[in-house]
Image (spheres, rainbow, N blue to C red):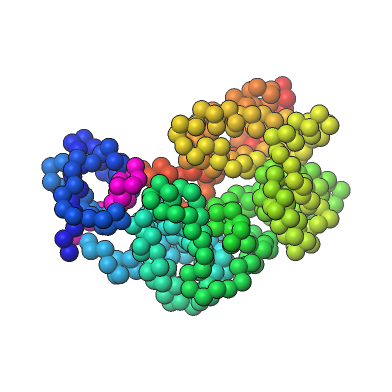
Amino acid sequence: MNEAKVTLKKGEGRTIKAGGAWIFDNEVDRIEGRFKNGDIVEIHDFDGYMMGRGFINQNSRIRIRMLTRKPGQEIDEEFLRMRVRNAWEYRKVVMHEGDLSCCRVIFGEADWLPGLVVDKYGDILVAECLALGMDRLKEKVISLLKDVLAEDGIIIRGVYERSDATVRKKEGLEPHKGFIGDEFDTNVEITENGIIYNVDVVNGQKTGFFLDQKYNRLAMQHIVAGLVGGSGEVGTKRDPAKKIKVLDCFTHMGTFALNMGLAGATDVTGLDISEYAVMQATENAKKNNLSDRVRFRAANVLDELPRLYEAGEKYDVLVLDPPAFTKSREATKNAIKGYREINMKGLKLVKDGGYFATCSCSHFMTQELFTEVISQAAKAVHKRLRQVEFRTQAPDHPILWASDESYYLKFYIFQVVDER
């Protein structure tokens, strides 16, 4: 197979030499040979050294997405099967027992399958494809994934594609969603951390559910279980006289709220601007017999937090899980202001000795920058913070070093120790 040859400029390619996955348009010196956008090409350093193979796309600033760094490796069915099997075997090692029932099984560049995300909800797969080259191979990769799962006795009954993000246009692709293969009921029931959810894979955000916060939600279960007099584990003996009041901001499907309600919190409120999300969360509370202690309402969190403060409300636990305030490097300055403001508003509502969880899901908001913003917010409202732990996304969303976009979720848990 005669592949086009891409040669990098002298001094460029530092990211992929460090282990990254992308080559940008301004790093390319010349392209020799015929190709179409989405084709696999050879990548060579300025001195002729072959650096591997990847997809090329002249529509995108990400000119090449790396598939392999091994010069002699062919990109064929066996190669794709190897990538898929490695992704699944990794998750069998790193996920807690029982958590493979719903997890991310392919995470793009971090699994060396660039541009492709596949989530597993029981016996359903939901795929998102954001790269032209992978778009051509997605059905083959998904077919191979079904084969690999079948080897472990897992039979997939349906696949749905949620490639409806507008970012596809940067690759010359139109947003798309629909069935891959036979149609099926797209309202899927899953269980995570002991909570049952109905997941709408057609209309829900992203692929229908945010699996990346799985163990962060479990960490908040642990905090609340400890507050109500248990050992920190759900199901242990607690003091029935202890009343724990919780506020879950940007609750989406009620995930943090329900986890804390299950752990024994007696008064849990979840806020979200989306009426549809509030409806889903309310149904999930009913499904888990938590409606007596966990309630949801539609509200703009930025407006609602000051109103609650003026009303004299205080909470034992408050969780901030906002959407990404920035999806570009250029918007980071405004995002800093947004994160600072929301953290200030949230901190003012936490009781002395209470617990405050806050996160950012933008890879442009680095850990260092996010830490600085929280520190500034605490100082501005005269709160002292004692860090309980710092967490990231669950390990089924692996972080590939030198691939900054794979490290996006930062999650802090603090105790607010006093107001002086």
Give the percent coordinates (x, y) of residue 210.
58, 54
Where, by quadrant of the figure, is residue 247 drawn?
A: top right
Q: Nearer the viewer, residue 33 or 192?
A: 33
Answer with left or right where residue 394 lies relative to residue 256: left
Answer with left or right where residue 291 lies relative to residue 141: right
Q: Is residue 80 above or below residue 29?
A: below
Give the percent coordinates (x, y) of residue 231.
71, 52
Answer with left or right where residue 210 lies relative to residue 351: left
Q: Is residue 274 above or below residue 204?
A: above
Q: Is 215 included in the stretch rendered in magenta? A: no
Q: Nearer the viewer, residue 361 or 175?
A: 175
Q: Nearer the viewer, residue 253 or 346?
A: 253
What is the span of residues highlighted in magenta in the rendered image? 56-72
Q: Is residue 289 above or below residue 158?
A: above
Residue drawn at (63%, 62%) of the image: 199
Residue drawn at (21%, 35%) of the image: 11
Q: Look at the image and tell me whether residue 353 can be seen.
A: no
Q: Is 58 included in the stretch rendered in magenta? A: yes
